[in-house]
């Protein structure tokens, strides 16, 4: 009987910050290109978490692209599932599926939809759609890890507008109660939801204090600072610890393309040819 050698990308890889910053802009550029295929896409809310995605996939997470369901991998769930457009290029680049799949994005019969489907896309640990469910799913996965004596972590990316959902706080309360120190929530706190500024729709501040009151270990930092994100991740407590962790990542919606930054109109849209070239040129201009 022969066995296939497994290539594991270990946690806290020594990826230079300049590479992570370039990778974040690459995610933004690929988002623009995939949106061109779809005819509409979530630019600004993907751009705000580009550094988070780059640092997670290219430094932080323990992954096994040639065995996507490897039991010891770290899990990554998208609460704000509409940013899957920024995740798919990372998965293709790491070898989870052929890069040619990207050219079929949202087309009839494609496995790559606006929201990710775990039954169709290797590397997607859980599907998303309605906002607010995946912290609960992540808590379940973290509890399962305890039952099976596995040391993987479960990371869940949330939007700050998503915190309006009551189920998020039920999951937060349960995770602390059951001592799930292997659960890590990351809030992409860009200050804006589909319906407008989060503080006006339903204020969730002081966000850090709320999570702390629910029994979580809290860190707040600049969500565009790849060095700070990497340092935070390297300092996470062991997966068998008893207190879940949340990172409140302060970000700018539309980050990286000046005319999109903090303009809520780019939450969902489509760039005309002139604006598309302006955006791609600005991203290309920062390449090292």
Image (cartoon, rainbow, N blue to C red):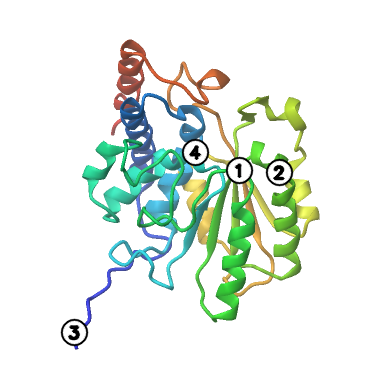
What residue sits 38% from the left and 18% below the top? Answer: 271
First in residue order: circle 4 vs circle 1: 4
What residue sits 35% from the left and 36% below the top? Answer: 106
First in residue order: circle 1 vs circle 2: 1
Disc 1, disc 2: CB below 8 Å? yes
Image disc number at residue 82: 4
Disc 4, disc 2: CB below 8 Å? no
> Which corner quadrant holds the C terminus?
top left
**What is the secondary structure assignment of the residue under circle 2?**
loop
Image disc number at residue 30: none
Bin the neighbour count of mark 3 within 10 Å (Cα to Cα): few under 14, some 14-19, many 20 and up: few
The image shows residue 284 at horizontal and vertical percentages of 29, 26
Image disc number at residue 131: 1
Location of residue 105 by image quarter: top left
Q: Label 4 vs label 2: CA separation?
A: 16 Å
Could you tell me how many numbered marks the image carries? 4
Residue under numbered circle 3: 2
First in residue order: circle 3 vs circle 4: 3
Location of residue 179 by image quarter: bottom right
Query: Extreme bottom residue here?
Result: 1
First in residue order: circle 3 vs circle 2: 3
**Residue 263 visible within the image:** no
Relative horizontal placement of residue 169, taking residue 28 as reference (left or right): right
Q: Is 159 in front, or is 110?
A: 110
First in residue order: circle 3 vs circle 1: 3
The image shows residue 148 at horizontal and vertical percentages of 54, 80
């Amino acid at each position: 009987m022969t066995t296939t050698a497994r290539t594991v990308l270990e946690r806290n890889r020594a990826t230079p910050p300049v590479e992570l910053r370039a990778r974040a802009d690459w995610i933004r550029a690929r988002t623009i290109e995939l949106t061109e295929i779809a005819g509409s896409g979530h630019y600004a809310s993907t751009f705000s978490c580009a550094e988070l995605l780059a640092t997670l996939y290219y430094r932080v997470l323990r992954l096994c692209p040639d065995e996507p369901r490897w039991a010891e991998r770290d899990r990554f769930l998208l609460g704000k599932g509409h940013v899957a457009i920024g995740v798919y290029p990372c998965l293709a680049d790491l070898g989870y599926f052929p890069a040619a799949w990207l050219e079929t994005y949202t087309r009839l019969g494609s496995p790559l939809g606006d929201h990710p489907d775990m039954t169709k896309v290797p590397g997607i640990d859980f599907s998303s759609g309605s906002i607010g469910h995946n912290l609960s799913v992540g808590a379940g996965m973290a509890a399962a890890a305890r039952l099976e004596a596995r040391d993987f972590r479960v990371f869940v990316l949330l939007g700050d507008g998503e915190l309006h959902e009551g189920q998020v706080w039920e999951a937060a309360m349960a995770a602390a109660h059951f001592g799930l120190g292997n659960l890590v929530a990351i809030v992409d706190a860009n200050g804006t939801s589909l319906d407008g500024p989060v503080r006006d729709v339903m204020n969730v501040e002081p966000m850090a204090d709320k999570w702390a009151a629910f029994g979580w270990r809290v860190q707040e930092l600049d969500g565009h600072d790849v060095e700070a994100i990497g340092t935070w991740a390297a300092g996470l407590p062991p997966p068998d610890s008893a207190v879940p962790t949340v990172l409140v990542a302060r970000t700018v919606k539309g980050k990286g393309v000046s005319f999109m930054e903090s303009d809520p109109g780019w939450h969902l849209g489509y760039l005309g040819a002139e604006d598309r070239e302006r955006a791609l040129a600005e991203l290309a201009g920062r390449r090292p």
